[in-house]
Image (cartoon, helix red, strand yellow):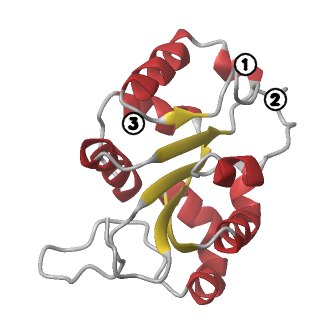
């Protein structure tokens, strides 16, 4: 963590789920709570939002990242003080729990655990996906590593396929 900044830095890691189409709501909520937001997209989230990247860059004041940089390229984002993975997909939760870091988003969130950063994950998962036994194992692994996963008891219940709302404000509040 850095102590000489005016605002705490939040890495908002956004996966490809319908709430990604309303990512500005999450950015505004985090900014209203005093966070300097850096947006990191999974490859598919980037594909969904690629027409909005310039607007998102202007909104956050930082480049929107979605892939690893080359070793000779400078870091363009300040180091994070906390990480919010929202919306977190079934795929990302399972890969993250397994330690897979094959995308920038996964690399940053797997590393965040080792750095001891505060991490909140707000899944957007339907009830059919939640019935898969891998999800319970993955959520238990992430919680055991210190990640606050807002799912189930004390969190949010999976929704019916093709439905559901997304509580951005609760996710931001869980970072406090």
**In this view, 84 is above or below 5:** above
Secondary structure of the residue carrying tag 2 is: loop
Determine crowd level at label 2: few under 14, some 14-19, many 20+ residues with C-alpha closer than 10 A.
few
* Sequence-first tag of 2 and 1: 1
Secondary structure of the residue carrying tag 1 is: helix
**In this view, 47 is above or below 102:** below
- Left or right: 165, with 120 as reference point: right
Disc 3 from disc 1: Cα separation: 20 Å
What residue is disc 1 on? 128
Instruction: Where is residue 108? Give x, y as percent.
Output: 34, 54
Determine crowd level at label 1: few under 14, some 14-19, many 20+ residues with C-alpha closer than 10 A.
few
Give the number of the mark in front: 3 or 1: 3
* Sequence-first tag of 2 and 3: 3
Instruction: Where is residue 88? Give x, y as percent.
Output: 58, 43
What residue is disc 2 on? 161
Are the two marked residues, 2 and 3, in contact with CB atoms closer than 8 angstroms?
A: no
Where residue 174 sits, quadrant-wise, is top right
Disc 2 from disc 1: Cα separation: 7 Å
Secondary structure of the residue carrying tag 3 is: helix
Give the number of the mark in front: 2 or 3: 3
User: What numbered label is drawn on residue 94?
Assistant: none
Q: Residue at x 46, y 14 (%)?
A: 137
Are the two marked residues, 2 and 1, in contact with CB atoms closer than 8 angstroms?
A: yes
């Amino acid at each position: 963590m850095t102590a000489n900044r005016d605002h705490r830095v939040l890495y908002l890691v956004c996966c490809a789920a319908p709430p990604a189409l309303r990512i500005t709501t999450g950015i505004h909520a985090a900014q209203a709570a005093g966070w300097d937001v850096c947006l990191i997209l999974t490859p598919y989230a980037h594909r969904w939002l690629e027409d909005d990247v310039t607007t998102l860059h202007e909104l956050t004041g930082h480049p929107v990242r979605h892939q690893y940089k080359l070793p000779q390229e400078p870091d363009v984002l300040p180091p994070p003080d906390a990480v919010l993975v929202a919306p977190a997909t079934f795929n990302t939760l399972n890969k993250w729990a397994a330690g897979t870091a094959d995308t920038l988003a996964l690399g940053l969130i797997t590393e965040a655990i080792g750095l001891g950063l505060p991490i909140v994950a707000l899944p957007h998962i339907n009830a059919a996906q939640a019935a898969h036994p891998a999800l319970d194992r993955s959520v238990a692994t992430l919680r055991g590593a210190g990640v606050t996963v807002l799912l189930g008891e004390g969190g949010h219940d999976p929704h019916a396929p093709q439905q559901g709302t997304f509580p951005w404000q609760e996710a931001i509040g869980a970072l406090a």
